[in-house]
Amino acid sequence: MSVSADPSVLHRQAPEASLSGFVDVMTCMPGEGWTIAGWVRSSTAPATRFAIAVLCHGQEVARATADNFRQDLVIPGEADGHHAFSVIVPDTKGVGDADLTAFDVITLPDRQRLPLTEQLAAAAHVTIRASIDIIGRDRIAGWLRNEAAPTTRLSVAVMVDGALRHRTLANQFRSDLRDSGLGDGRYGFDILLNPPLSAESDHTVVILCPETGANLPGSPIHFPATRRFNEIFRQHVRQTLGGIASARQRDQALAFLAEQADQLRFQQGREDSRQTATLQHRAAQRLGRTDADAATPPRLLFVDDRAPDPSRDAGSNALLSHMVAACDLHYEVSFIASVMPPSSAAIRQLEDQGITCWHPPAYPTVETLLRSQSNSFDGIYFHRLSNATRYLDLARLYMPGARLISSAADLAWLRLQRESIAENRPELRMAAGQEKVREHMAAWASHAVITHSSVEANLLGAAVPTASIYVVPWHLRLKEPPLSFDLRHGVAFIAHYGHAPNLDAAKWLVGEIWPRVRAHSPGIELLLVGSAMPDAVVRMDEIDGVRVLGHVADLDGFLRSVRLTIAPLRFGAGIKGKVLESWASGIPCVATPIAVEGMSLPPALLPAVASSAEDIARLTCELYENKDLSESLADAGREYIRIRHSEERVRNALERSLGLPRVSTTSK
């Protein structure tokens, strides 16, 4: 226990005008002994250093010189602060059973007794009332009060296996104590053990009051080593459950197992969220300790339907790019799939990039993760507004302090509305209207909204004026330059055919555009590449001039061999990833205005955009045959990718949208 007081005040309270001093620390550690500290000086001769003796029941047990420095003892122009003493009296001196009242500190040789500070004097008459409310391998909490002097505060010490692990003052405010009539309620303590006690070995924890050396009620506590979860244990559980014969017993067993599963998930959540380290850091910040500078990095959770697969769709590329950029910003990044659990390969791929992947059985749902790791994420990034719609309320409930970011891969309502017009499907208009309301509500309820398209940013901004909207691209690396013009052949349409706009584009391309291309240039071949091809696309392989390749494992190598790509989308929304991939590979792309919407194209790329089937066919033939025009557009595409989709541009835009504290490289 340590008390800091104004030395000038203590000087006035000293027993003699020429001598100032107090004993302000007396603490006992079982197995170690007593620590006794204080200070003494002469007001008339401040340069004098006094010898002191410690008496226990009148017998001298230690001596020291009061010449240690204490900043609070410095009086400019009068005293240099070298007037303190600190003495350890080991148990071997026969003081193990002593209490505060057994000790006296006197000056030598005149044997003047030094008084105790007011706080320590009150502690000398202690009647303990205490409770240990929480006891675990990583946390010990409770309260301690001196009934004889309720305005004083007592210390709490934690001994683990005979060694001092932690000591603090029981002075934290607890409203439940105040409401129960226990003074001002400032008798609480909450001690975090970092690292936690190992589960692999036995531990004995003693919680005591150093002023008296007495254990708190319930102390000591024994933590046995955790029993290993081995095959013998599994077999025992299987046999026990297999022997249940009645429905009532099964209900009881299921309730018990569910409770245990919840407890395991809660324990796992505490460990995964590093709650102990975070709480310790926050406590250090409040106390102004220097170790508070070693901040834990902000934790950022990404949520999408399933793990990103760069070969599947543009949304996957965007999500993965933003997660990697967040890692580069020194955030602690993690991911959970809301619909389809990730495969082992997908988990490894994310972890190889420094991204933690939460998955069953510990985290079977997004809600399980949020609940078991409550108050631990600084930001949550919902990819696709559908995920934001489902989980924003839960995120606010379990992570009230987190910044909530919704990323619109594309505006689903806009895509559906355009599809209803292009395919003359009135039923889609109602679905588009419903989706529009949901997406606008999600934007309104989020702290920030990310889009990739400037057009969609403007639409959202007009519909939800209070929303904070950011246009954030995703990173694309420039690929190896393609083969020379004369060595490349074919026109490729690359897409995920499970996406309605892409399937419609394939049908329009093969049914109306390609016959015009073949009429002008019979030697040009169309290559259909991608995943999730329905039978209608697979059968296109039977048409002259059309070859269906399906999924191509090495897409970069494939792109190097084609002369150009084509993106004849009639409807859709968002930024089209395969257009960007083509430019990054140095391959020109013939595209409709929908396919390049929101990209803010420079003038050099506009000649590659056409709307009608006839214009698209003409432009395709021209680019296929005109080497200079083709290479000019290819160069313009690569320059666009280099400038608009660089790592630095993505990182800066993402940092602005996340709105989280900047992290230094030393804090990760």
Image: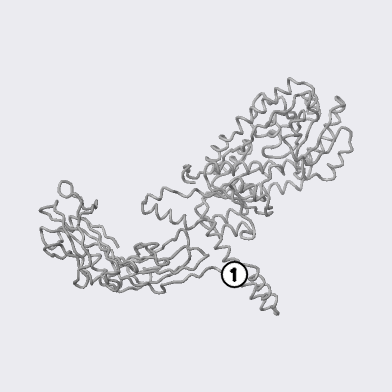
Q: Amino acid at mark 1?
A: Glu
**Total labels drawn:** 1
| Image quadrant assignment for residue 43 | bottom left
Residue 534 lies left or right of residue 128; in this view the side is right
Indicate the secondary structure of the residue bearing disc 1.
Answer: helix
Residue 477 x/y as whole percent: 64, 34
Name the residue rendered at 60%, 58% in the picture.
367
Residue 584 x/y as whole percent: 67, 31
Name the residue rendered at 53%, 52% in the picture.
377
Residue 660 x/y as whole percent: 50, 45
Q: Nearer the viewer, residue 329 or 20?
A: 20
Density class for disc 1 (Cα within 10 Å; few <14, some 14-19, many ≥20) is few
Q: Nearer the viewer, residue 635 or 447?
A: 635
> In what quadrant of the picture does the N terminus appear?
bottom left
Residue at the top extreme of this rendering: 628
Residue at the front extreme of this rendering: 92
Residue 226 x/y as whole percent: 54, 68
Instruction: Identify the residue position indicated by label 1 in the image.
Output: 259
Name the residue rendered at 55%, 49% in the picture.
300
Residue 96 lies left or right of residue 466; in this view the side is left
Here the colouring is: one colour
Q: Nearer the viewer, residue 71 or 12?
A: 71
Give above or below for 429 relative to 97: above
Q: Nearer the viewer, residue 25 or 472?
A: 25
Give above or below for 523 relative to 216: above
Give above or below for 658 relative to 563: below
